Amino acid sequence: MNNYFSIQDIDALPIWVEEAIAIKKNPLSHKTLGKDKTIGLLFFNPSLRTRLSTQKAALNLGMNVMVMNFTGEGWSLEYEDGTIMDQGNSEHVKEAAQVVSQYCDVLAIRAFAKLEDRDDDYSEKVLHGFINHASIPVINMESATRHPLQALTDAITISEYKKTDKPKVVLSWAPHPKALPQAVANSFVEMMQRMDADFVITHPVGFELASQITKQVPIDYNQENALKDADFVYVKNWSSYQDYGKVIDNDPFWKITSEKMKLTNDAKFMHCLPVRRNVVVDDAVLDSKNSIVIEQANNRTYAAQLVLKKILEKS
Ligand code: CP
């Protein structure tokens, strides 16, 4: 594996999940694999889990870690070819990616959607710019349209907690005061299509994700109906894909409550975090024994460690 851009870079999901669980049981089992290797983490957006879990994963493999908050500290980058750079951007990704490739052995990048121009976001110009011009492997730590480290984490977590071979998994939209990208939802939808799951998406009309991602996955516009007999309830807000980047509806009805969780098959509650309490989900659900969000976040380390291990073994 050269890059980890999306979950399409996972060649054999069940084996990957098994390997991640083995790493979790013995996180220092490959503690010299990354000796004398350096990973550079470039952040164009904030993070808690991705930043610390990826650092932890690299440290468990014996790597050196360099972190740079690009926004505010790095030069503003240009991504278009042939631009006359007489405006705001100071450096082209062509030079930036090649220079960073001299300092690091692996590069990981977080660059969210701007939610201004759908074609621009879905072209993934930041991640593709670095992938195209770097000479080292690149890992996606959440790009404009994908969050594959989160999706791998979610597959690991569901595999650990599932009680049946084919659990019912519901992805529910929930209210949020800000317009959020579709990346987490997109990667989760892609992952559920690869797992053996009875998978349903529920959201208000107008929040349909890109059809090239959802494909044949059933959409139920009635949240309570969708939640019936669920084994896992995965909650996430995203802004509209059709009316791109807009919060076209913020109906508090869609918040996850204890009453709604009673409709499920004693479902586990999942969220990638950070989560806005009592907006997305009630305290009573988040603090209940069925909430597995903290263990889900714990698994971020082992997902990142597995991806790094595969990259290091190939290099
Ligand atoms: N879930 C997730 O990516 O968390 P952070 O934004 O804190 O990294």
Image (cartoon, grey):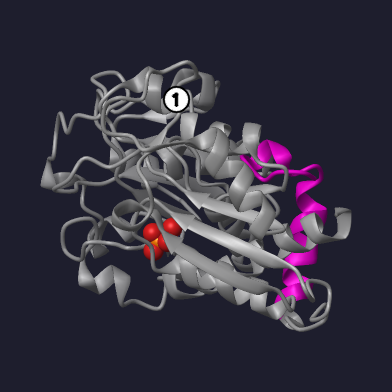
Residue 43: percent from left, percent from top:
43, 55
Graded by Cα atoms within 10 Å as few (under 14), some (14 to 19) or many (20 or more), the crowding at tag 1 reads: some
In the figure, 302 relative to 262: above or below? below
Q: Nearer the viewer, residue 175 or 138?
A: 138
**Residue extending furthest toward the right:** 314
Residue 165: percent from left, percent from top:
70, 53
Give the extent of the magenta segment: 1-24
Magenta-span inclusion, residue 189: no
Residue appearing at x 30%, y 35% in the figure: 114
Residue 295: percent from left, percent from top:
51, 74
Q: What amino acid is found at the position of numbered circle 1 in the picture?
A: Tyr
Residue appearing at x 47%, y 15% in the figure: 82
Classify mark 1: helix, strand or loop. helix
Q: Quadrant of ligand 1?
A: bottom left
Q: Which residue is mark 1?
A: 122
* Side (left or right) of 44 relative to 280: right
Magenta-span inclusion, residue 14: yes
